[in-house]
């Protein structure tokens, strides 16, 4: 249920009146804090943290549908997992299964059955029997609130499920969490899940939920964070289809997904802001947002082997009424188990899409031969450097990831370049004089309760090759309104032979916008859209051909789209299920639901899934980087395929072609880089 608050008009008088009548008067609206974007802040080093994955979902099953197989890969590598579910998942209280009689609605029981399904799914994810008992306890949260924490370990591997149990619906507002994000005068009262160790309901307002999520981040101190999509695509369609598919009006996702993602990113920003304010090291985490119902609208991108593994995680979650799991309220979410994820026409399980595609380190070679890697850590841009030329790769051959402290073997610690809060994807381009340009998407404002919610493209320009940087500079947004501006994608850029820098980004119409930097004085021209009205996915690929022409490729709904020097090519290209890659102006793509990568000569001999990177050098020809079906990093160069089978897991990886040949620089789940030379 909801409890409306009165607004304070005459603060002192109404406060007394409200206290006497039992009503509360809200304090003045707290503007969302933003950490100082200036560089040079201390960052927690690898020696001060342990790898931990933390997932934030709106409903039980969001992680299974949208964040896997990424979460499962990290869990398999030994990274502990904490998964937070904001709503109770109670919906209508009916645990339906086709062919079975309708049961009376029981929200407490349905919530408990879904929680039991999660315990079954994650027990199997740890390699344990699905009915393995969990330790269930009460977790004390900021403000005296309580949550249920269910814990299961297998040796050194560990999963913890945290249930906040906010309602999905209220008597006055059908969608409770979106209302909580927008309406400051709203309070929500938690549901009590049947059989939970939490026996007393709590209330949440906007600041209360942000504070609880921030408190959970401080408590667990994750190094990898998975969230849902805070800025889903604009999606226009007929009302009957929208309601049938449970999408919010105008956007390609469930309203709860968007609200929880916004609350989570606000909490991430507050966590960093509070650390900067208190003089503490910036928490060193990488964040990834996952698309939700977006998966229904685009070609599918998981090959059969990966899809089978992902769908198998939903079987124990869905459960069956014939199972004897020991939970009187039910043994799963019965409408989800069995083959239903694969037969569901919506096809959510058949894809895994990152909100900001292509989030990988930007790698450059400095004048002294050392490699530098740039990425986003703690929502801020950072730089890691090899302590000596080749030291990162040498340390990896010696069986370590390299030292975490500057001056040691391998890679030094992260150097804060500021600029936050940033989305995880950085674009980059190297100028003719060797200086680096970094491009990011900044959360210029992220505030609910009628506050601003704004994104902007930002630039960090190097003063000298391998040296310090100028101050961050805003490049605006190709969209004119804040709401449309939230839909922009990850920036990509390239420096043309004439010295001009071409910057590209997906826009709110699902087309491509560009802005060009002049070679003479570094000034930027206006944003303009590339021609063509076909919709494309994010994950743009850009390269130069032998004649110096700029090629841009993007995966569309019906085919890959291709522009050369800003002009769309008329040729009909194949359909791609995932993001595309390009080197030397040539296209590499995977057909929908396929493992095999296709290049200009046909089969590229590079089976797998997920993003692919292509690069070309005179010595090595075209080199490909990606992951195999098991999520392991692999490289194809010189006609040979090599797979990385040892060392830290890869959250993301980049390819550098230089004097040492092909070097892969990846980020491990502890937020520290590693190197690999196949």
Image (cartoon, helix red, strand yellow):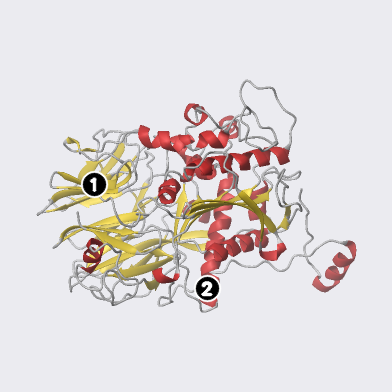
Does label 2 or label 1 sit earlier along the sequence?
A: 2
Q: Which quadrant does the C terminus fall into?
A: bottom left
Residue at 59% in and 36% down: 246
Label 1 neighbour load within 10 Å: few <14, some 14-19, many 20+ = many
Q: Using the rendered view, name the quadrant where residue 410 is placed.
A: bottom left
Where's residue 313, x and y in %? Answer: 49, 38
Where's residue 100, x and y in %? Answer: 65, 22
Which residue in the protein does label 2 denote?
275
Residue at 69% in and 42% down: 174
Name the mark nearer the viewer: 2 or 1.
2
Where's residue 504, x and y in %? Answer: 33, 54
Which residue in the protein does label 1 denote?
582
Q: Residue pushed farthest top?
A: 99
Label 2 neighbour load within 10 Å: few <14, some 14-19, many 20+ = some
Q: Is residue 640 left or right of residue 314?
A: left
- Relative to 676, residue 462 above or below: below
Q: Is residue 492 left or right of residue 245?
A: left
Q: Is residue 152 left or right of residue 41?
A: right
Q: Residue pushed farthest right?
A: 20
Tell me, yes or no, if residue 524 can be seen here. no
Element under disc 1: strand
Where's residue 8, x and y in %? Answer: 78, 66
Tell me, yes or no, if residue 305 can be seen here. yes
Residue at 58% in and 57% down: 263
């Amino acid at each position: 249920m909801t409890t409306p608050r009165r607004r304070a008009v005459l603060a002192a008088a109404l406060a007394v009146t409200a206290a006497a009548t039992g009503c509360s008067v809200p304090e003045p609206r707290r503007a969302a804090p933003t950490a100082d974007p200036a560089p040079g802040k201390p960052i927690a080093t690898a020696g001060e943290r342990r790898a931990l994955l933390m997932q934030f979902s709106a409903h039980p099953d969001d992680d299974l549908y949208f964040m896997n197989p990424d979460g499962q890969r990290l869990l398999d590598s030994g990274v502990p997992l904490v998964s937070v579910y904001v709503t109770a998942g109670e919906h209508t209280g009916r645990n339906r299964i086709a062919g079975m009689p309708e049961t009376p609605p029981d929200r407490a029981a349905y919530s408990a059955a879904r929680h039991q399904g999660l315990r079954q799914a994650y027990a199997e994810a740890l390699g344990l029997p699905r009915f393995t008992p969990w330790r269930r306890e009460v977790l004390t949260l900021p403000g005296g609130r309580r949550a249920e924490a269910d814990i299961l370990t297998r040796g050194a591997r560990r999963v913890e499920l945290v249930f906040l149990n906010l309602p999905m619906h209220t008597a006055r507002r059908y969608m409770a969490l979106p209302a909580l994000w927008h309406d400051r005068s709203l309070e929500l009262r938690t549901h009590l899940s049947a059989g939970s160790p939490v026996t007393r309901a709590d209330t949440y307002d906007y600041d209360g939920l942000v504070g609880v999520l921030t408190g959970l981040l401080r408590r667990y101190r994750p190094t990898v964070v998975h969230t849902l999509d805070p800025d889903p695509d604009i999606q226009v369609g007929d009302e009957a289809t929208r309601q049938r598919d449970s999408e919010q009006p105008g956007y390609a996702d469930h309203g709860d997904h968007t609200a929880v993602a916004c609350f989570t990113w606000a909490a991430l920003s507050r966590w960093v802001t509070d650390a900067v304010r208190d003089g503490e090291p910036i928490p060193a985490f990488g964040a990834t947002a996952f698309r939700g119902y977006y998966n229904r609208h685009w070609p599918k991108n998981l090959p059969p082997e990966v899809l089978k593994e992902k769908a198998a995680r939903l079987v124990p979650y869905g459960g069956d009424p014939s199972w004897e799991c020991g939970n009187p309220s039910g043994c799963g979410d019965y409408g989800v188990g069995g083959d239903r994820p694969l037969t569901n026409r919506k096809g959510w399980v058949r894809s895994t899409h990152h909100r900001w595609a292509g989030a990988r380190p930007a790698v450059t070679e400095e004048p002294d031969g050392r490699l530098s890697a740039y990425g986003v850590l703690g929502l801020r841009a950072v730089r890691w450097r090899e302590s000596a030329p080749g030291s990162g790769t040498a340390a990896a051959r010696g069986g370590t990831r390299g030292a975490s402290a500057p001056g040691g073997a391998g890679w030094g610690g992260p150097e804060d370049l500021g600029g936050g809060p940033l989305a995880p994807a950085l674009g980059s381009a190297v100028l003719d004089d060797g200086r680096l340009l970094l491009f990011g998407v900044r959360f210029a404002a992220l505030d609910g309760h009628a506050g601003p919610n704004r994104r902007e493209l930002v630039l960090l320009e190097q003063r000298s090759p391998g040296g310090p940087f100028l101050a961050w500079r805003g490049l605006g947004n190709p969209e004119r309104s804040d709401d449309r501006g939230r839909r922009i994608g990850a920036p990509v850029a390239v420096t043309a032979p004439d010295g001009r820098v071409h910057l590209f980004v997906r826009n709110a119409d699902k087309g491509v916008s560009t802005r060009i930097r002049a070679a003479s004085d570094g000034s930027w021209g206006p944003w303009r859209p590339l021609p063509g009205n076909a919709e494309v996915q994010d994950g743009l690929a850009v390269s130069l051909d032998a004649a110096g022409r700029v090629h841009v490729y993007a995966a569309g709904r019906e085919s890959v789209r291709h522009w050369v020097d800003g002009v769309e090519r008329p040729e009909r290209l194949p359909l791609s299920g995932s993001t595309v890659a390009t080197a030397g102006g040539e296209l590499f793509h995977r057909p929908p639901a396929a493992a095999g990568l296709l290049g200009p000569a046909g089969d590229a001999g590079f089976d797998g899934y997920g993003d692919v990177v292509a690069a070309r050098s005179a010595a090595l020809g075209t080199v490909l980087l990606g992951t195999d079906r098991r999520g392991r990093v692999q490289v194809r160069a010189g006609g040979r395929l090599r797979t990385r089978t040892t060392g830290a897991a890869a959250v993301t990886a980049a390819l550098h072609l230089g004097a040492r040949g092909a070097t892969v620089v990846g980020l491990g789940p502890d937020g520290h880089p590693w190197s690999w030379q196949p």
